[in-house]
Image: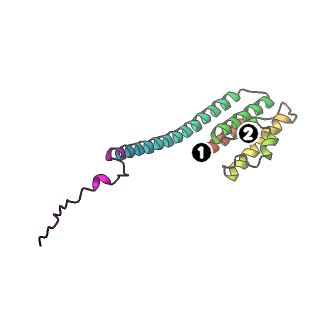
Amino acid sequence: MDENTPKLDLRDIPEVEKFIPHPALPWWAWLMIALFSVALVLFFVRLARSKVATAESIRAKAYHEAMTELEKAKSIQNPVTLATTVSLTIRHYLALVFSDSSIFETHEEFLSRHDALARLPEPSRQQISTHFQQLARLKYAPVEESRDLSGLIPQAIELIDHLHVIKI
């Protein structure tokens, strides 16, 4: 009996690495993503810093403009014109620094708006309201020409100085 055994030709196991799909990105793509992420973070940090600087520069500019306007208003003799100028100066400062819409409102509209200057502490809001009431009496009530208005501008300067130091 002649047994012919078949010759077994066994092959080595092939490399399977080339058959496995690689879902990962190549190293250079990860590097690009990392660099882009760092650049994006730096951009937002710089943007945030510039907004803070811009807010501070707006506050400083508004303060300087208000003080200049109040200095010019010292020469005004008419009580109604003086009260109107002081009121507009303060309202303009509030509009620039606190983004308040009071510059376009009447005194009654400002008082009836409950969210007016809500970011300010209550004593500051009360001080502004009291000052605006005084200005409204001068603007809208009959005024005798002999009324002493010498304290009006120093009060406005004191109010703006007080508002300027408040950090919100």
Disc 2: CA contacts within 10 A as few (<14), some (14-19) or many (>=20):
many
Q: How is the image coloured?
A: rainbow
Name which residue type carries label 1: Val
Q: To which residue does mark 2 refer? A: 102
Q: Report x, y in % for residue 154.
A: 68, 38
Q: Does residue 108 appear to the left or right of 120 in the view shown?
A: right
The residue positioned 32% from the left and 47% from the top of the image is 27
Residue farthest toward the front in the current orientation of the protein: 1
Which region is colored magenta?
1-29
Name which residue type carries label 2: Ser
Above or below — where is 147 with respect to 21?
above
Q: Report x, y in % for residue 107.
A: 80, 40
Q: Report x, y in % for residue 115.
A: 73, 48
Q: To which residue does mark 1 refer? A: 165
Observer-nearest of 118 and 128:
118
Q: Which mark is residue 117?
A: none
Above or below — where is 74 with respect to 28?
above
* Mark 2 vs mark 1, CA separation in Å: 20 Å
Residue farthest toward the bottom in the current orientation of the protein: 1
Q: Earlier in the sequence, mark 2 or mark 1?
A: 2
In the rendered image, which quarter is residue 158 located in? Answer: top right
